[in-house]
Amino acid sequence: MALDLSAVQASENVWKMAQRQLDDVAGLIGLNDSIHGYLREPKRVLEVSVPVRMDSGKFHMFKGYRVQHNMSRGPAKGGIRFHPDVTLDEVKALAMWMTWKCALVNIPFGGAKGGVICDPKSMSEQELENLTRRFTSEISVIIGPEKDIPAPDVYTTPQIMAWIMDTFSMQKGYSIPGVVTGKPLAVGGSLGRDKATARGCLYVTGEAMQTLGIPVYGARVAIQGFGNAGMYAAELMAEAGYKIVAVSDSRGGVANPKGLDIAGVVAHKKETGSVVGFTGGERIDNHDLLEYDCEVLVPAALEKVIARENAPRIRAKIVAEAANGPTLPEADKILHERGIMVLPDILANAGGVTVSYFEWVQDLQENFWEEDEINQRLRQKMTRAFKETYEQSQRHGIDMRRGAYAVAVSRVAEATRLRGLYP
């Protein structure tokens, strides 16, 4: 019987969860009480009303947020999501996680996040453009290439990033490509950015496989979520020799223990809008996918999908979090006790922000790199972050999430201490 996690997910406040993760590592690294209190709260929270002219000619009011958690190590960095379930607490949590993510891969950014409460699937392209441009105008007081650099997230695209860049540039009177990353190549985007999150996940999963002595070739992978991160992860991992045995999206999933034809699944998804109905496997739901028999489980959808209730039935040896916050703290403990290595979100999906950093650097320098160089630099960053995380986990006898937090929080705390308080 499939587990209904809706009640569990509703009861767990994602912002409290993010704060608990910080609290959990504070004692381990001897975090100063004052700095601990400072890091528990966001630096700045902006809530805006966004009036948008709809195709009907009427105005509709949307609510949007931009949260900057910490900027001790550099300008804030983080995506913008368009989703009907966006909440302020979710955006605050995601901003905090971005702080740790940037610190873990050692790029000079702090953490931020944004969101608009809307249903983009029900909106026309013109309505989405109107929404994006007005939201950009409302948050323009706190964003900029030296202050806060947005990027794509759930249901936002390179085209939406182009509208943000154009709107901000028009307000300033000249082109400012560095205000946003994840743009199309034609307006200052970077090669390799579209697959960066998935590629980073591939790199750290490979490191984990080697560490645990599991051969890559033929290793079975189940991927929950078939958007940008999940789809590209399936393609890249299949190319690397993994066997993709199950994939899913918001409508459901498809599985085949002998392996799925990923090119066929991608084509079916593009044609029908879902992986459901692909004839090369049997239908399963998202909860069953999480418990599917495999070596690697890749949660690549939304938050809080692995909970205390289903953690005992996870059969993977490695959980690579391509999504933000898919594992609840109680589930983390259960997975660790069962010997399952969790590659935490701030490590496993840090490829996106790493190549966003590369894009920002290229924009500022007006000098663009070849894709091979970008992928090589990404591998170096991700491999080093994995090794530092694993070293901390072994030194303290802790799970990989706390190992990653030990590295990241220490870096942010040190920068905060050195800068002090002004005035």
Image (tube, helix red, strand yellow):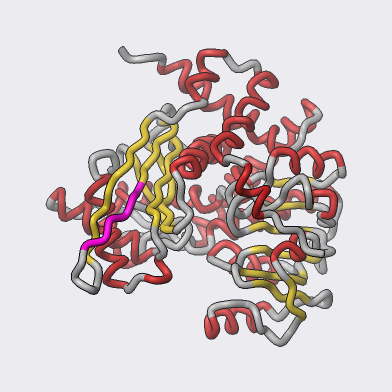
Q: How many marks?
A: 0
Camera sees residue 221? no
**Which percent across, then down, holds residue 272?**
55, 83
Q: Position of residue 113 (x, y in %)?
A: 43, 44
Report the predominant secondary structure element of the magenta stretch.
strand
What residue range appears in magenta?
59-64
Considering depth in this image, is 236 or 272 the residue closer to the camera?
272
- Residue 100 left/right relative to 112: right
| Vertical order, 295 against 280 (above or below) | above
* Farthest-out residue, left: 173
In depth, the one of 23 and 120 nearer the eye is 120
Split into 4 quadrants, where in the image is the N terminus?
bottom right
Regarding residue 76, the answer to whether it shows in the image is yes
> Does the stretch in magenta take in 259?
no
**Quarter assignment of residue 267:** bottom right
Between 222 and 334, the one lying in front of the other is 334
Residue 259 lies left or right of residue 95; in this view the side is right
Residue at (20%, 53%) from the top-left corner?
A: 169
Image position of 54 with respect to 174: above or below? below
Q: Is residue 128 above or below residue 207?
A: below
Does the magenta portion include 61?
yes
Q: Position of residue 129 (x, y in %)?
A: 28, 65
What is the quadrant of the C terminus in the image? Answer: top left
In depth, the one of 74 and 157 nearer the eye is: 157
* Picture residue at 65% right of the left edge, 54% below the top: 6
Relative to residue 109, is residue 411 drawn left or right? right
Q: Position of residue 381 (x, y in %)?
A: 58, 45
Q: Residue at x 54, y 37 (%)?
A: 15
Reply above or below: 45 against 140.
above
Residue in the picture at 42% in, 40% down: 112
